[in-house]
Image (cartoon, rainbow, N blue to C red):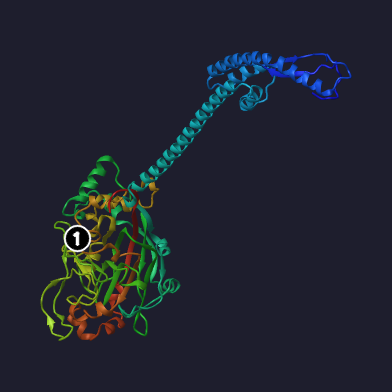
Amino acid sequence: MSTNQAPNEKTPLRHAHFEGTTSNVSTEYQSSSSAGESSNDDETSDDEGQIFYEQPLQSSQSRREMRMADRLSVRLLAAQEDSEEEDRILSESLKLEHPPSLHNSRRSFVTSSFGRSGRFRDLLDNTMEEQEQAQNKLQWMGLVLLLFGIAILVGIGYGAAAVIEIRPPLQPVGPYRLIERQEGMSLFDAYTFYEGKDSVGSNGYNMYVGQAQAEGLGIINMTMEDDVLDIFYANDNDDDTVDSDGNLRQRRRAQASTGNATTRKQEPFVYVGSSPTKAGPRDSIRLEGKRFFDRGLFILDVRHMPAGCGVWPAFWLVDEPNWPVNGEIDIVEGVNYQTEAKTAMHSTRGCKMDDIPLGTMTGTWDTAQGIPDAKTGIPDMTLRYAQNCFVYDPHQWLNQGCVAVDQSGGTIGVPLNEKGGGVYVLEWDPMNRHIRSWVFTPHTSVPENLVQAIRTANEAPEKQVVPDPDDWPVPYAYFAIGKGTNCASDHFRHMHLVLNTAFCGSVAGNRYHMDCTKEQTTQFPTCKEYIKSNPKEIRDEAYWKIRGVYVYEREWERTWIT
């Protein structure tokens, strides 16, 4: 106590705050000594008096605080982890109307208020530590659950990706879809006119001209005529046009019985010919397709094809700048007076057709015999089938390739023209591991499915008949390509259509004395001399008459075929 305090002044002994109650515990006394007494005596008296009165009051107060703290602790423990309930209890105990975040600050506030009670402090500390530990546990559990949930979501994502990856890939194995219809003068829109001399390999005795010059010479034009198919469908009483299988008779009778006989109508036909020149080589046409293919169904409906001595027409697939790396497929190829259709394939090394399953083709293989030995020049008279597509196979003629031959006869050249032409089809289907070839002549022998596909090609897509080669007769040519065969499918790729007419050259010219008549070879010692004479046969027979070219490709579908 200060030595300068007035004698009768009240001095507070304790000012304690507890549960909102203020206790002013004071001891008042008067000094029994006179004013003149020494200050030391007063100080001693005061200290003794303070000690004498404070000790009993402090013990009683402490016991009261401990009891109240015990009750508060019990209430807080009963509230467990309910923060709102704890705040309410503390608010009531401390008489606070608007406690500021009691739950968050209660530990510091209550501890400071009841810090004098060690028992309460320990109990409260233990309670708060347990709550913090519980909260930490909850936080860790929440974090673990969050990470676990993220892992599950990531797993689901990867699982979904895995499901997508293991789905069957899209591959061209579905039904055929028409992608090019070449009819009338629009046929020329699908091609470019090559101009210039023939290639060195073919070495034809002709000059290819552009479209404008060809139109000026009159060697390309279009006419509207009755379609032979329409005539066959309309004349249901003409039994002379029925093929050996009676296909046409059945179709006509079926239509006649339902009153659906077809009326004749005019259809466009394209003529592609040639013209003589004073110099000798004929002006001719070479059409090169604008689109390149890696597969497809190629249909050529012709009513007349070039024929005669020294004539070499062809309808084929090739990639000239990359020959023979990307291969070559000859769909139709006529030479001089040959009468049997052939399909030939030319490739790099490693493509053989010596593994063709039985029953897959009706034709046979071309042969190679008398090939001169590369070292001695002595002819090898061993008869071999031309089943090696490699253009430089030493046991076949140069660039002979693998050649399948139709055995029915009369399927190209003069006999074909006498029957009114025919339909040639090549199916190039790497996914199904084959290349197949058909020829149907006369038109009465064309399968009904193919007839309807051609007739409806100019209709809306939903009205078009889809060609189905599996519904047709067995092809005359079958080439196995792809996995599990002796010819990888990539020997044939990225090729476009070519239609041309060459004269003489490395094939027709070399066979001039073998194929042409004695009269012709006697009068004209060489093929070039014969062509230069512009004979009537060439003027009358060396032309194409085309009803249309139709190209289909398979739709893409998901499948496990590899």
Quadrant housing residue 404: bottom left
Three-letter code for the amino acid on which mark 1 is drawn? Tyr
Above-or-below relation of 305 to 162: below
Tell which residue pokes out farthest to the right in this image. Answer: 36
Q: From the top left corner, tell me how far across and down residue 123 is, in percent.
A: 55, 22
Q: Quadrant of the C terminus?
A: bottom left
Foreground: 471 or 4?
4
Quadrant housing residue 500: bottom left
Identified at 14% across, 56% down, the residue is: 359
Quadrant housing residue 362: bottom left
- Location of mark 1 (residue): 476
Identified at 20% across, 50% down, the residue is: 247
Graded by Cα atoms within 10 Å as few (under 14), some (14 to 19) or many (20 or more), the crowding at tag 1 reads many
Q: From the top left corner, tell me how far across and down residue 159 is, in percent.
A: 38, 43
Could you tell whether 75 is left or right of 39 in the image? left
Identified at 81% across, 24% down, the residue is: 40
Foreground: 120 or 389?
120
| Residue 426 visible in image | yes
| Residue 429 visible in image | no
Foreground: 231 or 12?
12
Q: In which quarter of the image is the N terminus?
A: top right
Above-or-below relation of 305 to 231: below
Could you tell whether 54 is left or right of 5 in the image? left
Identified at 58% across, 18% down, the residue is: 85
Could you tell whether 535 is left or right of 40 in the image? left
- Which element is circle 1 on? loop
Above-or-below relation of 286 to 246: below
Q: From the top left corner, tell me how far across and down residue 285 is, in percent.
A: 37, 72
Q: From the top left corner, tell me how far across and down residue 464 is, in percent.
A: 35, 48
